[in-house]
């Protein structure tokens, strides 16, 4: 003899929510009815609906207007049938119709007011949560930026002994970080816009007419904002000293777009041409430590082509969709 096991169907979340809402509605109406029975000797029979208004208000405030309407209709039926003279019967006369209509009208106003209050409270809570997330993202970016400043300062101190030169080298990079954080703080703090970031970082160089940018506006994760700002500043600084911006004819193309066959990956390409011939440096300078893969950037490849420097920067956008 074989035993056949039946499949047990798990209720959906929607069914569970509906069942819970129905239970709370019945509980609220039941409580109002018991209170009405308790105070029946103290109030007139015409006040059949008095105890149901608080239940309608609370159910609407916590469960929404649909649950409030259901509570209203069930309350109207029970109160009219049980408490409105003649008790335990529907008279269907004019007095009953008028009393029930007035209750429904007044209770509808309560539902509308409670629903408006609920919506306002939900919006306030959502705004509070977004603001908290924004502060957290900005604080994390500030912490990361401070760590970068310490790292940059350490590398500069190992190569530069002159205080004035130390200040000049460090000040430019701190300025780039500050501009990147400005772009981040202008939004919700959960992303920074590109090319807004590039335009803000490259603005101090004053050579906007020699930069060409192509690509659709895109949001970058907050952890990529500061390191990308440093990379762009370093590339522009090197271009001004040795590359396409060191003469009158060089130009720079900054392009970006999704990576083929790689989901949620953005490729940003810096490409110089028209400047003096370039070659790979024989020794690693300060900038070489910044122009490499680092936290916040999925990958970075720097090429010293004879016609000009090219740099491919990959940014992982998956954290945006995950958040």
Image: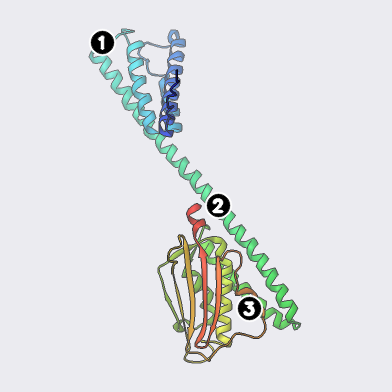
| Coloring scheme used | rainbow
- Closer to the chain start, of discs 3 and 1, is 1
Residues at circles 3 and 1 in contact by the CB criterion of under 8 Å: no
Q: In which quarter of the image is residue 64?
A: top left
Q: Position of residue 271 (x, y in %)?
A: 48, 80
Would you name the residue on which mark 2 appears?
133
Residues at circles 3 and 2 in contact by the CB criterion of under 8 Å: no
Q: Camera-side residue: 268 or 227?
A: 268
Nearer mark to the viewer, of 3 and 2: 3
Outermost residue, front side:
1
Nearer mark to the viewer, of 1 and 2: 2
Nearer mark to the viewer, of 3 and 1: 3
Would you name the residue on which mark 1 appears?
91
Would you name the residue on which mark 3 appears?
287
| Dot 2: element | helix
Classed neighbour count for the residue bearing mark 2: other residues with Cα under 10 Å, few (<14), some (14–19), many (≥20): some
């Amino acid at each position: 003899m074989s035993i056949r096991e039946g499949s047990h169907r798990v209720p959906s979340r929607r069914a569970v929510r509906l069942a819970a809402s129905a239970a709370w509605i019945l509980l609220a109406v039941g409580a109002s009815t018991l209170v009405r029975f308790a105070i029946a000797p103290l109030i007139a029979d015409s006040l059949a609906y008095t105890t149901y208004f608080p239940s309608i208000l609370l159910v609407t405030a916590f469960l929404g207007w649909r649950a409030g309407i259901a509570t209203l209709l069930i309350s109207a039926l029970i109160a009219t049938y049980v408490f409105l003279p003649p008790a335990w019967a529907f008279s269907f006369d004019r007095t009953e119709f008028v009393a029930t209509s007035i209750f429904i009208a007044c209770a509808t106003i309560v539902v509308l007011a409670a629903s408006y209050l609920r919506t306002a409270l939900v919006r306030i809570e959502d705004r509070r949560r977004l603001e908290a997330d924004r502060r957290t993202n900005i604080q994390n970016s500030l912490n990361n930026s401070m760590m970068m400043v310490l790292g940059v300062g350490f590398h500069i101190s190992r190569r530069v002994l002159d205080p004035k030169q130390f200040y000049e080298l460090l000040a430019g990079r701190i300025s780039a970080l500050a501009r990147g954080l400005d772009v981040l703080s202008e939004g919700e703090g959960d992303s920074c816009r590109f090319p807004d970031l590039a335009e803000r970082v490259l603005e101090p160089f004053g050579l906007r007419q020699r930069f060409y940018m192509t690509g659709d506006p895109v949001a970058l994760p907050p952890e990529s904002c500061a390191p990308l700002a440093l990379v762009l500043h370093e590339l522009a600084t090197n271009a001004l000293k040795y590359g396409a911006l060191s003469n009158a004819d060089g130009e720079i193309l900054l392009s970006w777009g999704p990576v083929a066959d790689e989901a949620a990956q953005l490729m940003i390409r810096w490409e110089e041409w028209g400047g003096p011939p370039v070659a790979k440096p024989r020794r690693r300078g300060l900038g070489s430590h910044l122009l490499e893969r680092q936290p916040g950037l999925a990958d970075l490849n720097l090429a010293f082509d004879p016609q000009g420097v090219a740099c491919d920067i990959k940014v992982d956008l998956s954290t945006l969709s995950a958040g």
